[in-house]
């Protein structure tokens, strides 16, 4: 009897061990889930994260946001306004068809034609004026003006299959490409068009539950270690943490800050972190009338620069970082962490409640007004708590402030409909330089130029637009950096949006896994490795 | 019923109310429930005077006093007896104010649902036939959905706010009363006193209001008491899920939710104390309700 038990136990152990060695599975718990699997629908970190597993871009970035080859093997500036990309040969889509220049052309054409896109990628395609494809493995991109950011911008969007979408004949036209119809976002969610060249293929997508990816056996690059990767959105901090500690998931993003201290000491868990390219900010509506301000006789006080300055000075950013963020963030005085390309070293964090009150009085609001801040409650680290802290700081200078918190999808659709006078959001500089937040958040919305796609506040400053346009056309890096820093100063001195802090991104994983922390906050399964 | 009987056997007129009170006072557990409930109700009513801080006035909060453990004081010397949450909200005050929200929502939604259910149930029972069948099928449909689901959908449409939570909870609860009233009224309707009233050709309204209604009340009172507790739990659940009250005016459910994130990091008080307050409220209401059921149920007497 006893012997039997031993044999049984042995067999069971062999079975378990064997099973473990053969099917390498990685389970990732994420704090936010993508709004869609359509790679061009929503320029949002959770979407871009999953996109990078399935769809690849021409150029890629490493963990420090330096450019590395991806679908393009090499690229060079032929002259000021012409770029040449040499494509990798023999790359196959998940359906077996070959990747060629036409897929790039089709992708470029499709991006402006995504219906109801909440935050479009046109921001990164507007620079392209004309495309030539002398052979299937060469792309010549022409720009109207010198456009130094082109290779960087090629990292931001994933290439979809022209063949799968029926776009083999589509040609690029700056004024708008011609096609019978454009693929619907739904076709990417249900898997029909979720065909990329990436290291993983889509196996299953259940919104709110999980995204399952299988390894692409025909991947051209280094094949990932994992046969199967499951992303599980666990938006509440506690349960996400519990899932990691209980071994239900192998790695989590955004481990709750209040637990970091304890996690670092836990022998079963390892934590990695890095300062991110994301700034969390408050956007101030400039439209009149504005929806969530009361007690001003219909006027929008945010149009007055003194009020905006008061709102900025009233915020004690150090306190937020210390108390709400557990010191895992840095107070922000501009839209990208200083030290990164195009930031301004002269901008300093200021806080002065007394002066804020004086400014409000000078602007004609000695008794303040009523304000509601909109915020997501599961998108950025402690987003709702930050909004509440800001609300109490505003209440102290006499602005009666409420917080209206909603889940990410609800928040963004309401934000896009202009339902908030002040809202909290974050911006990741996908390109790693200051032009990204400046162009998206504070430049006047001009669709043709790709300016201001995420400027939902009707903010417009001609001086800023002019400087930014000039900077974006300057090929010389040193001169461009100087111009960008100057643009940043103009934006910040006009209090166009109010930066709060830069997030420090961390990941927690079971011991035995390693991950190089990425400034762009992406959690890429292909780069998660187990120590051998 | 032993020691008290000889005393109450004195030649006094026994009114239903008196019988009820005597029966109620009979149980020690029920008395404990009543005392606790009274304590909860009074501290909620007196919250603005006894709470150390107004937790809904954001200008009184300071994040620098956030996450203080129970019994500690901040730099200005204010003592936080039950600790503070991450916004620097005194938990004792927040619980007292949260109780106000909970009780307000519980009692008012129950009262509204009771009124609606009473009317609809009476109509169904007295009218009978097709009207009865239609109304009862509606009730069946409503009862076949989980209450929390209907409340979530309603709040998604209505938006946030205490008034909206009350409306949503009244909407999910009326069906219970309608069904209870109907069954009670059906039984009463066939009794002789109703027949007698009908023979006297009294107007229908009078028969329903003066004769039927008072006799249907006892089971309703029991259902209502239990439903108040149920409504409070529902409100807490909705707030926990973040669809109930605004985040700057937390109710008990929302306090529990915001403390929930800290459970694993050792800062237990943000969740545990509001949870205890909720527990005490619900248990005391249920104790009182149970005893009421026993007293009002003729089958359990004698």
Image: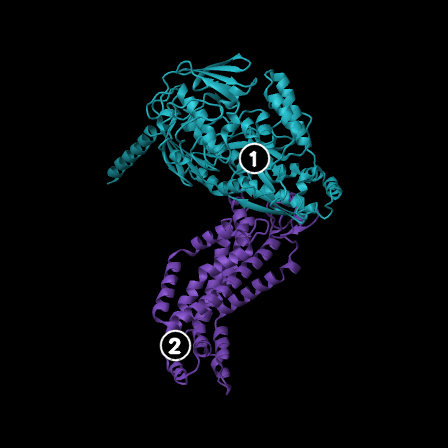
Q: Which element is circle 1 on?
A: strand
Count residues near mark 1 (Cα–Cα under 10 Å), then give few for <14, some for 14-19, many for 20+: many
Picture quadrant of residue A206: top left
Q: Could you say where residue A7 lies in the image, as x and y percent from the top left?
A: 26, 35
Q: Please identify the quadrant where the C terminus of chain A is shown.
A: top left
Q: Could you say where residue B253 lies in the image, as x and y percent from the top left?
A: 52, 52
Q: Which one is in front, A17 or A313?
A: A313
The chain shown in cyan is which?
A
Count residues near mark 2 (Cα–Cα under 10 Å), then give few for <14, some for 14-19, many for 20+: some
Kindly identify which chain the residue marked by label 1 belongs to: A
Q: Please say if A26 is above or below B228.
A: above
Residue B188 has which mark? 2
Q: Colour of chain B?
A: purple
Q: From the viewer's perspective, is A461 left or right of A264?
A: right
Q: Residue at x 38, y 34 (%)?
A: A187
Q: Could you say where residue A264 lies in the image, as x and y percent from the top left?
A: 52, 33
Residue A426 has which mark? 1
Q: Which one is in front, A8 or B182?
A: B182
Q: Which element is circle 2 on?
A: helix
Q: How is the image coloured?
A: by chain
Disc 2 from disc 1: Cα separation: 65 Å
Q: Please identify the quadrant where the N terminus of chain A is shown.
A: top left
Residue lying furthest top: A78
Q: From the viewer's perspective, is B7 left or right of A332?
A: left
Q: Could you say where residue A99 lies in the image, as x and y percent from the top left?
A: 38, 20
Picture quadrant of residue A529: top left
- Residues tagged by mark 2 and mark 1 found on one chain of the structure: no
Q: From the viewer's perspective, is B144 left or right of B165?
A: left
């Amino acid at each position: 009897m006893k012997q039997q038990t031993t044999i049984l136990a042995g067999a069971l152990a062999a079975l378990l061990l064997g099973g473990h060695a053969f099917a390498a599975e990685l389970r990732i718990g994420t704090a936010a889930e993508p709004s869609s699997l359509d790679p061009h629908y929503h320029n949002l970190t959770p979407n871009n994260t999953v996109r990078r597993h399935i769809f690849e871009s021409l150029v890629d970035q490493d963990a420090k946001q330096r450019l590395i080859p991806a679908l393009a093997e090499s690229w060079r500036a032929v002259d000021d306004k012409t770029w040449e990309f040499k494509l990798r040969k023999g790359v196959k889509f998940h359906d077996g068809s070959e990747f060629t220049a036409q897929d790039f052309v089709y992708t470029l054409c499709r991006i402006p034609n995504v219906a109801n896109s909440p935050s479009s990628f046109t921001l990164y395609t507007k620079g392209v004026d004309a495309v030539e494809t002398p052979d299937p493995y060469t792309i010549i991109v022409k720009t109207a003006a010198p456009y130094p950011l082109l290779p960087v911008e090629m990292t931001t969007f994933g290439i979809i299959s022209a063949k799968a979408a029926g776009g083999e004949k589509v040609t690029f036209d700056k004024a708008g490409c011609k096609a019978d119809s454009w693929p619907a976002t739904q076709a990417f969610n249900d898997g029909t068009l979720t065909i990329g060249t990436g290291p993983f293929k889509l196996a299953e997508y259940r919104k709110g539950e999980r995204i399952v990816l299988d390894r692409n056996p025909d991947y051209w690059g280094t094949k990932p270690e994992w046969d199967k990767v499951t992303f599980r959105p666990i938006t509440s901090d506690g349960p996400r943490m519990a899932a990691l500690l209980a071994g239900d998931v192998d790695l989590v993003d955004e481990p709750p800050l209040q637990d970091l201290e304890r996690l670092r000491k836990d022998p079963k868990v390892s934590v990695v972190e890095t300062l991110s390219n994301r700034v969390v900010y408050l956007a101030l509506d400039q439209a009149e009338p504005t929806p969530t301000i009361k007690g001003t006789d219909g006027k929008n006080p945010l149009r007055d620069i003194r009020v905006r300055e008061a709102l900025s000075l009233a915020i004690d950013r150090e306190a937020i970082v210390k108390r709400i963020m557990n010191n895992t963030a840095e107070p922000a005085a501009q839209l990208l962490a200083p030290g990164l390309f195009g930031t301004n070293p002269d901008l300093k964090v200021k806080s002065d409640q007394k002066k804020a009150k004086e400014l409000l009085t000078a602007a004609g609001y000695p008794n303040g007004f009523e304000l509601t801040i909109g915020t997501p409650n599961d998108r950025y680290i402690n987003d709702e708590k930050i909004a509440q802290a800001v609300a109490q700081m505003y209440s102290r200078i006499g602005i009666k402030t409420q917080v209206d918190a909603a889940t990410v999808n609800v928040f963004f659709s309401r934000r896009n409909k202009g339902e908030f006078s002040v809202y909290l959001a974050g911006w990741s500089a996908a390109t790693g330089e200051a032009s990204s937040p400046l162009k998206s958040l504070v430049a006047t919305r001009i669709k043709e130029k790709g300016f201001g796609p995420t400027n939902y506040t009707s903010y417009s400053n001609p001086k800023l637009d002019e400087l930014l346009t000039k900077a974006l056309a300057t090929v010389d890096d040193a001169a461009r950096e100087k111009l960008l820093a100057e643009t940043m100063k103009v934006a910040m001195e006009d209090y166009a949006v109010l930066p709060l802090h830069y997030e420090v991104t961390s990941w927690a994983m079971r011991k035995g896994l390693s991950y190089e922390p990425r400034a762009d906050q992406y959690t890429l399964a292909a780069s998660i490795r187990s120590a051998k | 019923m032993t020691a008290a009987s000889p005393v109450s056997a004195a030649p006094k007129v026994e009114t239903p109310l008196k019988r009820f009170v005597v029966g109620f006072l009979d149980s020690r557990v029920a008395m404990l429930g009543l005392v606790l409930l009274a304590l909860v109700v009074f501290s909620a009513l007196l919250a603005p005077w006894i709470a150390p801080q107004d937790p809904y006035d954001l200008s009184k909060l300071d994040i620098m006093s956030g996450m203080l453990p129970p019994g500690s004081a901040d730099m200005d010397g204010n003592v936080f007896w039950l600790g503070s949450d991450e916004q620097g909200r005194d938990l004792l005050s927040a619980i007292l104010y949260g109780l106000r929200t909970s009780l307000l929502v519980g009692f008012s939604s129950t009262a509204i649902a009771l009124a609606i259910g009473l009317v609809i149930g009476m109509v169904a029972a007295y009218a009978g036939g097709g009207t009865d069948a239609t109304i009862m099928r509606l009730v069946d449909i409503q009862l076949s959905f989980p209450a929390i689901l209907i409340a979530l959908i309603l709040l998604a449409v209505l938006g946030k706010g205490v008034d909206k939570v009350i409306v949503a909870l009244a909407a999910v609860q009326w069906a219970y009363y309608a069904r209870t009233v109907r069954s009670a009224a059906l039984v009463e309707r066939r009794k002789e006193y109703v027949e007698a009233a009908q023979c006297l050709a009294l107007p229908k309204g009078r028969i329903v209001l003066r004769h039927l209604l008072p006799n249907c009340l006892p089971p309703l009172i029991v259902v209502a008491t239990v439903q108040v507790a149920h409504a409070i739990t529902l409100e807490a659940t909705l707030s926990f899920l973040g669809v109930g009250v605004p985040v700057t005016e937390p109710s008990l459910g929302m306090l529990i939710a915001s403390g929930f994130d800290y459970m694993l990091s050792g800062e237990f008080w943000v969740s545990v104390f509001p949870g205890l307050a909720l527990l005490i409220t619900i248990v005391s209401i249920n104790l009182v309700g149970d005893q009421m059921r026993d007293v009002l149920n003729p089958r359990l007497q004698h």
